[in-house]
Amino acid sequence: MQLQSVHAEFEQAGISIAFVTFEQGYWLDRWLEITQINFPILLDPQKDLYQAFGLQRSIRRTWNLPTLWFYAKKLIRGEKLVATGGDLHQLGGDFILDRHGQVLLAYYSHDPTDRPPPALLLRSVPFKS
């Protein structure tokens, strides 16, 4: 998980990281076991936050050749894939909000493998003096 590597830098800036997911139960537990993240998890089973932030669903962008190749390479390297019990076509995103709820950065994932580099996220954070 890329954010684990820069967690201290976010904390230094006074930023808390939380994950929002619609997954619950077994599938969420399985994902946490494999990823070993230690950030708070916010459950959104009705996907209200996904809708509020304008995150899209897309069959075409979920099952495209680059995405399939991404997962094939992981399997070739012997990495574990995290199964899901939920909506395979729901795309994600990364958002940084200030303490007043103002969006400082909105990154909409183009496909399931598209995550912004941590450096991009950090650049959007106003560091404390």
Image: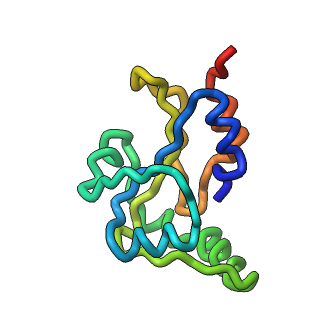
The answer to whether residue 40 is left or right of residue 34 is left
Picture coordinates of residue 89 (x, y %)? Answer: 40, 66
Residue farthest to the top, as pictured: 129
Q: Report the colour scheme.
A: rainbow
- Of the pair 7 and 81, the residue shown nearer to us: 7
State the residue lying farthest toward the right.
77
Give the left or right position of residue 82, taking residue 66 as reference.
Answer: left
- Classify 102 as above or below 63: above
* Residue at the image position 33 percent from the left and 54 percent from the top: 43
Place of residue 34 in the rendered image (x, y in percent of width and height, measured from the top left): 56, 73
Determine the residue positioned at 67% across, 54% down: 2
Q: Quadrant of residue 107?
A: top right
- Which quadrant of the figure contains the N terminus? bottom right
**Where residue 5 sits: x, y (%)?**
71, 50
Which quadrant would the C terminus be assigned to in this image? top right
- Identified at 65% across, 18% down, the residue is 128
Q: Nearer the viewer, residue 5 or 96?
A: 5
